[in-house]
Amino acid sequence: MKTNLSNSRQFKILWKFFAKHSPEVEARGNEELLPEQKAALALLASGKCDRAAREKLIPLLKCNKHALTFLAEQIKLIRLERSGRDGTHRSKARRGNS
Amino acid sequence: MTDKHYDLVLVKRALSGDERAAHTIYAMRSQLVNYLISKGAPEGSVSEDIVADFLGDCFGARDRSDRASAVRLLETYKGNGPLIGWLKVCCWKKFLDYARRFKAIPLSGEEVPDSVALAAPAEISLEPEVKAKVLAALEYAFDEIDSLQLIFLRLVYFEGVNQKDVAAAFDCDGSTISRQLSEGLRALRHNIDLFQRRYAGSFRLEWSDLLAVCQSPPDFLYEN
């Protein structure tokens, strides 16, 4: 692609413009998530969903902007928790070695 | 002339509008991305975006609404050391700022702030006719793209989720996500071209022009 922007940046520019200006996205993507939908998305983030459950969530993720944002937050949260745990393990190991 | 003097001259030329000099500095992008990763920054879009933003800041490209008073980070380079070393240090500081901001994001129903919008740029107005045509092309392109590819693109490129974490959630390997991202972006571009050929009549935008139109204000964009 003849631009100096990274792929992620190019996508961000287009998606941000689209999400901001498209009345369709605004209209269809604003429903609040139900507790069971949040639970299903949290399960997906943890990697414990089976194929059927994942496929069931795809339409929700495609159409509801809160769903995708919620999933992203959950995945990031799991990563942070995991890196925190790893850090604790590492420092315990260091203390054990000294 | 020493390397430091050469670097200072290069910076001055770039700031005075010499495109080749600017390009030389911009070509250090991959070195900066590798440096961030070697220091522990995540691989992929996060590091790439931080470097892209940083290089934009170097030329005041994210503050073009008031170009005369735009702060150009490169103006603070005084030639006291090699330019690449100076760029690496500044870029790493920018990553640390980003990381601190990321940790401060609350887990609520609110929309996560987009990492692109570190500085709030001023809006530029767009002709309603142009806007409608661009939106129609985007709507077609996003609608035609494979659902899973679009989800991956939004998660990784827009929400800044690590590719490996997406792969773990969707029970596949990282290379699958990487391939899906490339194919997704290619499909997006193809669909936009297709829409313009079929429905847009004489109104045609090149990819880089489309990006420039969608970005407000236009960022550090030029053809290689």
Image (cartoon, rainbow, N blue to C red):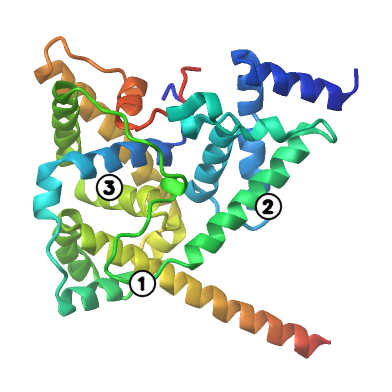
Residue B107 got which mark?
Answer: 1
What subunit carries mark 1? Answer: B
SS at mark 2? helix
Mark nearer the viewer, 3 or 2: 2
Three-letter amino acid code of the residue under disc 1: Leu
Labelled disc at residue B21? none
Query: Which of pointers 3 and 2 lies earlier in the amino acid sequence?
Result: 2
Image coordinates of residue B72 in percent, x first then y, are: 61, 32
Between disc 1 and disc 3, the foreground one is: 1
Residue at numbered disc 3: B149
In the foreground, A59 or B126: B126
Mark positioned earlier in the residue sequence (1 or 3): 1
Side of B54 relative to B86 (left or right): left
- Which residue lies under the disc numbered 2? B38
Label 3 Cα crowd, 10 Å radius (few <14 / some 14-19 / many 20+): some
The image quadrant where one finds the N terminus of chain B is: top right
